[in-house]
Amino acid sequence: EHGPYYIRVATRGRGGAWSAPHTLGISGQVRAPDIRVAANARGDAEVAWRGRRRLTRHSSIDAIQSSFRPAGGRFGPARTAPGHPRGGPQQLLLDEDGNAYAVWNKQVQFGTQRRGGAWTVRGLGPSNTGEPVLAVARDGAIVVAWGHTNIAGHVIGPISARIRPAGGTFGPAVQIGGQIAYGLHALALANGETVVVWGVERPASVGPILADLHYVVRPPGGAFGPEVTPPGLSFGLTAGTDLAAFGDGRLVIVWGGNAIAAATRPAGGSFGAPESV
């Protein structure tokens, strides 16, 4: 009932059977440790979670922990990132060289790890920020976006972002969107674009509360363009949303509610009408 709770992983080769579970670490008394899994095309994999860092024999604090598995190998020992997060990792990505990138709450923390090594962490946002998202573009640029929070801790607008060009350092924060945000996502597309998507709550009315889809696009090597609101794309605030990208640059957003629906944006184009799934 009171823990501890263990982080375990099982793997399966293409068309094969699942392996026996392997313990990566411990999440202490956290039942929902916000586990994130990332992999790359060569077969490297990384698992990150909200764990515990021991301070003394009888005390410990929340910490971001992870384990790296090289292609064809085994998961290594848990690595603990410095700092004291508010919650677990929001997003985890692994590049083609096996380097990991992650973001988590508490003033938008951005962590980097070179192929299973030690984590390096820096803060990117002010104190009233939350729900950060992350994308690594085809040109090597790293995009981190987040919303601003009110006194109750709820994420509201405006939406801000910082960009780190390949081999460079993060530029200043820029506002890429406004109003109340819901379901913030970021995704790098095969054609080099980076898209940040979120919902904006409609004014209260009779019936279910709805959010309209908003998004911005960053072309390869460039800055984010203006905020776009495609007509006819809305979803309930209680409905989950998710994104998926195709190899030809198409982007699909899927949402739930009374029915599952999706809308597709072709590479360099605009979202089409929603379709039932």
Image (tube, rainbow, N blue to C red):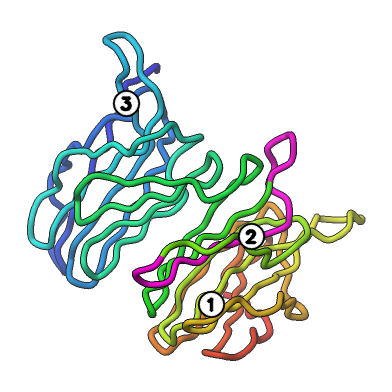
Q: Residues within 10 Å of mark 3 (few under 14, many from 20)?
A: many
Please state, as top left, top right, bottom left or bottom right, where the C terminus lies in the image.
bottom right
Mark 1 or mark 2, earlier in chain: 2
Secondary structure, mark 3, is strand
Instruction: Assign a secondary structure to mark 1.
Output: strand
Q: Is residue 57 above or below residue 23?
A: above
Judge whether 214 appears above or below 240 on screen: below
Residues rendered magenta in the picture: 149-168
Most extreme residue toward the top is 58
- The CA span between labels 3 and 1 is 39 Å
Determine whether the residue tagged by mark 2 lies in a helix, strand or loop: strand
Residue at horizontal 91%, vertical 56%? 205
**Residue type highlighted by circle 3:** Arg
Task: Give the residue number, with chain letter if any, for mark 1.
Answer: 252
Query: Which residue in the protein does label 3 denote?
Result: 53
Report the mark closest to the observer, 3 or 2: 2
Confirm or deny contact between disc 1 and disc 2 (CB under 8 A). no
Q: Residue at x 51, y 69 (%)?
A: 243
Q: Name the residue under label 2.
A: 160
Q: Of label 3 and label 1, which has the lower sequence position? A: 3
Which disc, if any, is residue 169?
Answer: none
Residue 19 is situated, as x and y percent measured from the top left of the image, at 13, 50
Report x, y in % for residue 274.
66, 79
Q: Residue at x 62, y 40 (%)?
A: 127
Residue 79 vertical position relative to residue 277 in the rendered view, above or below: above
Amino acid carrying label 2: it is Ser
The residue shown at (88%, 58%) is 203
